[in-house]
Every structure is written in structure tokens, then in C-alpha cells.
Image (cartoon, coloured by chain):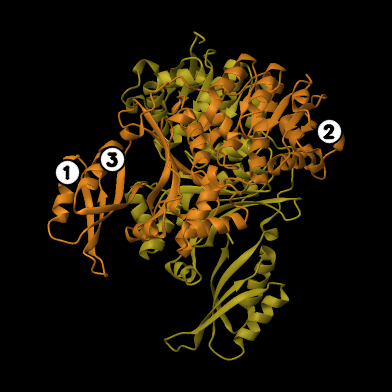
Chain colours: A orange, B yellow
Amino acid sequence: MRKRPLKVALLGCGVVGSEVARIMTTHADDLAARIGAPVELAGVAVRRPSRVRDGIDPALVTTDATALVKRGDIDVVVEVIGGIEPARTLITTAFEYGASVVSANKALLAQDGAALHAAAEEHGEDLYYEAAVAGAIPLIRPLRESLAGDKVNRVLGIVNGTTNFILDKMDSTGAGYQEALDEATALGYAEADPTADVEAFDAAAKAAILAGIAFHTRVRLDDVYREGMTEVTAADFASARAMGCTIKLLAICERAADGGSVTARVHPAMIPLTHPLASVRGAYNAVFVESDAAGQLMFYGPGAGGAPTASAVLGDLVAVCRNRLSGATGPGESAYAALPVSPMGDVVTRYHISLDVADKPGVLAQVATVFAEHGVSIDTVRQQGRQDGDGEASLVVVTHRASDASLTGTVEALRKLDTVRGVASIMRVEGE
Amino acid sequence: MRKRPLKVALLGCGVVGSEVARIMTTHADDLAARIGAPVELAGVAVRRPSRVRDGIDPALVTTDATALVKRGDIDVVVEVIGGIEPARTLITTAFEYGASVVSANKALLAQDGAALHAAAEEHGEDLYYEAAVAGAIPLIRPLRESLAGDKVNRVLGIVNGTTNFILDKMDSTGAGYQEALDEATALGYAEADPTADVEAFDAAAKAAILAGIAFHTRVRLDDVYREGMTEVTAADFASARAMGCTIKLLAICERAADGGSVTARVHPAMIPLTHPLASVRGAYNAVFVESDAAGQLMFYGPGAGGAPTASAVLGDLVAVCRNRLSGATGPGESAYAALPVSPMGDVVTRYHISLDVADKPGVLAQVATVFAEHGVSIDTVRQQGRQDGDGEASLVVVTHRASDASLTGTVEALRKLDTVRGVASIMRVEGE
């Protein structure tokens, strides 16, 4: 075994960072055996030194992250600060000063992944980030390595635990969105400002990362269609249940049928109760991957939390340390396919549309004509008069597969019909 | 991009090998881009050249596998022959002649993994075998790399598609074992001689491989307790259903509670219908992994078949080729922990026992006393008189957790009771 220990700089010591430090200490012998050399915590950069957790040598703690990264003897920088800056500058500085980087920073990777990968490659360093997507679930490595000889056609997953907790609660208790969010907040599953989760910014970042790796194509955050889940109602769940479905916030990355382009999107969708993703409960995450040769794979586990995220960080740390000892680097960015990313209008899927219509003869025929004119084929229609006798009825239409652009055109035309009083909800139907 | 192509020798061109060859040809450009150099099929060794599939250049085909491996210009040998010999000799010869090896051979890896790893290390070559366990499902790489910074405590999985198909059929249709096996055979899910599957030799080999990797300990095939599923009856499924369970053939690798030893076993077991493994249908595989930091992870997908297995083989091929280009090797055998493998008697779990007893007062008290004397605590008892009035009743006992040795002692003592006419079935209860 090599005598000189590998030196690790830990940037950030919050929920994840403190777990990384703890495991590095308690499992030091195992890590050394698996890496082939001891690994040593050389410094911990924090904003507030007074908050540093038990078990970390106070002498290692600094508020000057830049100086730590520039020390020159650091082998690996573990970045668990999150956010764009100062994380981005610290990571590129790490490469310049001869360190590889393990990051859990999905927002940064989704926004600047290409530039960071280029910087890593320029300096011959590794950039690993398994923890950035779906916490502890091995997903980046399977996509980037296990499926490297296969052709991935679709990635379909629940990649945000907070929103899955909320939707699961709505589904199982009949609660409304606000009530379920309040419970998630009280239990610590949702942050005080839940915007990043419920408006799907977090899931969109993960979708960009997954699509890029799955399709060997650069997918920017702006390429991802994003729709949050704040407008999902108890009535939507009742509609979903009526057609044997539940509602999940899904990240969906797809290769077009002709193989010539890809799409990435995040939105609430109905999926059949028989689909394995339908039974993913609470704050768990799960991701389906469909490929030419392997067929359908699913990866399931805790998508967040200090210890699970630390598990992913440490797996990467071991890999990067091994690479360092052997003088090699792992697989870098693979964007050779350079497929165009199509806009949302090109996405083809099924739709569940609830309309409030006038309760009189001929309405269904009118509505059906609008769908037909826009090339959207109807699968089923359910029509029901209201009990209050106000002359309105509701019409639920489930379509066959159609492009998002066709559906949008259909809905615009429906809104112009006198007999259509309102479009109560539109939801995509996936996983069939 | 490096000009000289990497040369691959394919040993075996059956269901898996022909898919490997097909994908290497059709996806040649993608593989080259992902590896960083073209990869070329340099030869295909088969037993019967007349059977070689379309799309393979006949000039590449040979019946002399040894000569192919000894050519001296082969970079990677892909072994998909299966069985112990000649596969073992061909693999060690490959290392001697400077080639790395990708294998799908679970029987060989389970029996001689240590020696093969040692040979690979001696010659500075890679030995990869993702396809040996659970077909297309990334499992070896996640355990060996993604979880390299974590402490795995348990691996619990369905790793044989044939038996899962049979058990699923019995569960869903009420069919008996033979009827379900016949259907599996007719549909091509079971081989003409199904012994390796139904007697769990196949699953035991996979359990040995998984336990070794999960616990960084050498686990030999002989260390794995093995019990087939030929004696599972429709009545067992009815009993399972009565307690909210189904029956699966499970491979279970566990670290003892004190961390000082491990066990590996394969047998049919009841698991709750609410457990994710309960809903794994048909010939699919799924593996649960429980670790200190990550918590519970599950990996799901097709566990066999030509294309899925080829996907795993090609993922390894890409990794090995990349290693070769960078002059490094991937992680080898990790057996540093060298934990003792405990015998089956030390395994602690719950049990479901059906007894045929005399239908008279005091029997339950007698039976309960025997359990207590052996230190096996009873969770629930269900007693029912038979309709035919032959003076017999059935008694179903579900225990709390107890060692296999205690349970065995209990059952031996029960058999000696005059009032116990027979032990109808004993089944372990897992996944709770």
C-alpha cells in the first residue's frame, strides 16, 4: 500500500458534508483498503465555523475555501455547498491546482456541466457527481458505464422526493396540495421556501443531467420543459383513480422515434397504478431506463438526505482516488452524438382533458370535431351531467398519442367553442 | 482518436454471443466514440461453425478457441460459453497472452473467482463480469463502485428468472409446481433439464458472487446454503396469501448483527405483498441492497435473455477498453475484510410452520411448550379443525426471529410428539 495518504478538501459541512466527514473518519480503514491508500480529510471549508459538527477536528476547519483549494497538496475536492457561486469558481480552481472533484451540485452541473467537464479534461482531472441526481441511487454510473454499450431510448423517473411525498400524501389521504405541503414542511421534507421543488426547478436540473448522459448529447437546463405541481388538485387524483392511474411528477428524457432528436421535460403526469413507478411512496425516488438491448431497468432508493447523499459522494471519492493512484481518469463528458433537443411541441404522448361544457345535445359531436381537425385521436370520452342542474356537464377526454403542439392547438380551439365553458384540467398520461 | 482498433475475441456465439456480435457491428460508431478508439471483432470461436448466425463474417469463425486466444494481438476476450471448462482455461490463457476478459459465466466465477482474479492481477489485466448476475441489471458495478464508500449489510433478491416465472404463475393462477414448470418450458423460460434453476444452483452461484463483492470477503459456492423450489405447493401459496405474503425464491446475503461474520443462502421464502420484491413478475429479476448510509436501494430488470445479457457484456467491454487505452485496470477482487462465513444454523429469521396435529384439547399447549423450550418465540398461531372429521386439525405457527439451528431443534422435537402427525411445511418469512 502506498504510504502517502490522499488528501481530501471538503467544501461545505451541512447535512451532507458532515455525513461525508463522519464516514471518512469511522470507515477510514475500509476506505483505505478499497482505495489502496489511506484517505485523509485535509480541510473543511464552512461559512460559520461555530456550526461545525462533533467529530471534526477544529484545526481542519476554515472559512477560506479558496485558500484550501489552492493549497496545492489536495488530491480531491468534495463540493457539497450547492448553488452556482462560489461552487463553480472553487471547482475550476480545484482543477487548476491539480485536484479532482466530486460534487453533489445538480444546479451547477445542469447549468455549466459542459464548461466544468471541459475544465476537468483540460487539466487531466476527474469530475464525478453521482450524488447530484437521485441521492444514493446509483444512476449516473450505470448510465455512463453499465449502459455504455447499449442505446438508451428513454429515462422516466421520480427524481424529487419532496414532491413525491406531497403527491403520495394527496393520493393516499385525499388532501389538497396546500395541506399536503404543510405536512411535508412540518416533517422536514419540504424547505421553508419550497419553490425549487414544487415548481420542478430541481427535477428539471436532474432531467438535463440525465438526458445529457443517456443520449451522449449536451442538454442544457433551458432545453428542459418544466411544469410544477402546485396546480394538481384532489379532483385530478379522483380523475386519475377513475382511469386506474395515480399522479407523479415525472422527469422524462426521450429519444424521438426516428432517433434523430431528443426531448427532456418535467411535469405532473398520470401513470397506471400497475406501473412500478406508481408504487413509489413517500420521499423515495425511482428511475426507469429503457434501452435497445437491456430493455426496462428500474433503480429505486432514497433520493435525498444526508447519509444517502454521502453514500453516493463517497462512492465517487473511492473511484476518483483509485483513478488517481493508477494515473488514469474516468469517463468524462460524452456528448459526441450531439443530437438536437426538440421543443416541447414535438413531444408525443397521451392526454387526459377535463372540460366543463353546456349540458345539451350536440356538444360531444362539436368537441370531437375539434379534436379530429387537429389530428388528435380520441381514445375514450366520459360525459356526466352535474347534480346541481345548472346546465353544465363535465366531459373527460383521454386521447391516443399526439404531439404537444397538436394538443395545444386543440385546446385553444376548444376554448373558443361557446359550448365549452372552461378547460378544468389537462394532464399528460405516461408510462403505458 | 487512436488509430489502431482494439481487437475482441468472442468465445461462444449462442443466444448471448450472437447479440454481442450484432451490437458490436450495428453500433460500431457509437462504441468507438464512447471508448475513444474503434473496436473490432477479431474472431469468433464456436463449437459448430454451421450454426453461426447471419451478420457474422464467416472468415472470423473458428472452432479453435485456444488458438484465437493465443493469437497475441487480442485486447479483450469475451467469454460467453458458460460452464467450467474449457471456459476457465481459456480465460487464464487470455490473461497470459495479454488480454483482458469480460465474462458472463456465473458458475465459473462462483467456483473459481478468487483464482481467476488472482490470474488477472498477476498479468495486469481486467476481469469484468456484470452479465454473470441478474443479466442486464447493473448490480456488480453499483456494488463494487457506487457503494464502495458505504457498508452493505444485506443483499436480498430474485436472481433467477425461470423460477420467478414459475412461482409467479403458481401465485396468479393457483397452478401446481409441475403445471407451472410445463408452461415455463413450453414458453422457453425453462430449459429441458431445469435442475440448475429449480434446485437453485444458478441462484446459489449468483449469491456467492454478490456476497463476495458486497462484503469484501471471499464467499465460495460451498458456503451458500441452497434449497430449491420444487416442493413449493399451491397450499403453501394459500398459506402465504392468508398472512398477506407471496412466495419467492430469494438469494439472501447478510452481515451478522455484530458485523463479525456473513451468511449467504438461497431458498423459497414468504415475503409480504407490500414488499417491492413481491410485485416482481414473470421472468424479471430484482435485487434489494441495504447499506448503512444509502439505506434501501432496489435494482430491477430482465435477468436473462440474449439482448439484455449482451447489454451488460458490452458495458463491461467499453469499460475494459477504456481502461486499456488509459493503461489502467479497474477494481479487482476486494476480499480484504476476510469475514468468516457462518453456517446456516446461525441465520436468524422468521418461520411459517404448518403442522398436522391431533384434534383434541391440550395440543396447542404441548406444541407451544416445545417452541418455548428451544427458545423460539411464537408470533401467531392459527388452529383449524378439518372438515372430514378424521380427528386431525392443522396448526399454523408463525414465529418471531430465531436462529435456524433453534428452529431445526424445535421441528425435530415436534416430530417426536404423539399429537403431531406430521410437519406439512416449513417456510422462512423474509423482507419484514
Do the residues under discs 3 and 1 have CB atoms within 8 angstroms?
A: no
Provide the secondary structure element on which disc 2 rests. helix
Which residue appears at 58% of the width and 78% of the height? B381
Vertically, is B146 above or below A67? below
Element under disc 3: helix
Task: Measure the alpha-carbon separation of dots 3 and 1.
Answer: 13 Å
- Disc 3 marks a residue whose amino acid type is Thr
In the foreground, B150 or A63: A63
Residue in front for this viewpoint, B195 or B241 = B241
10 Å crowding of disc 3: few (<14), some (14-19), many (20+):
few
Residue A344 percent across, percent down from the top left: 35, 34
Amino acid tagged 1:
Ala
**In the rendered image, which residue does mark 2 sit on?**
A60
Q: Chain of mark 2?
A: A
Q: What x and y, as percent, mark residue A34?
A: 72, 34
State which tag comes first along the sequence, 1 or 2: 2
Q: Which residue is mark 1?
A: A372
Residue in front for this viewpoint, B269 or A73: A73
**In this rendering, which labeled residue sits more in front, label 3 or label 2?**
3
- The structure residue drawn at horizontal position 47% and vertical position 38%, both measured from the top left corner, is B136
Residue B376 x %, y % = 68, 72
- Does the image show residue B277? no
**Mark 1 → mark 2, Cα distance in angstroms:** 68 Å
SS at mark 1? Answer: helix
Q: Which quadrant: the N terminus of chain A?
A: top right
Q: Say which chain tag 3 marks.
A: A
* Chain where mark 1 sits: A
Question: Nearer the observer, disc 1 or disc 2?
Answer: 1
Query: Which of disc 2 and disc 3 is earlier in sequence?
Result: 2
Amino acid type of disc 2?
Answer: Leu
Answer whether residue A362 is visible to the viewer in this image: yes
**Residue picked out by circle 3:** A408
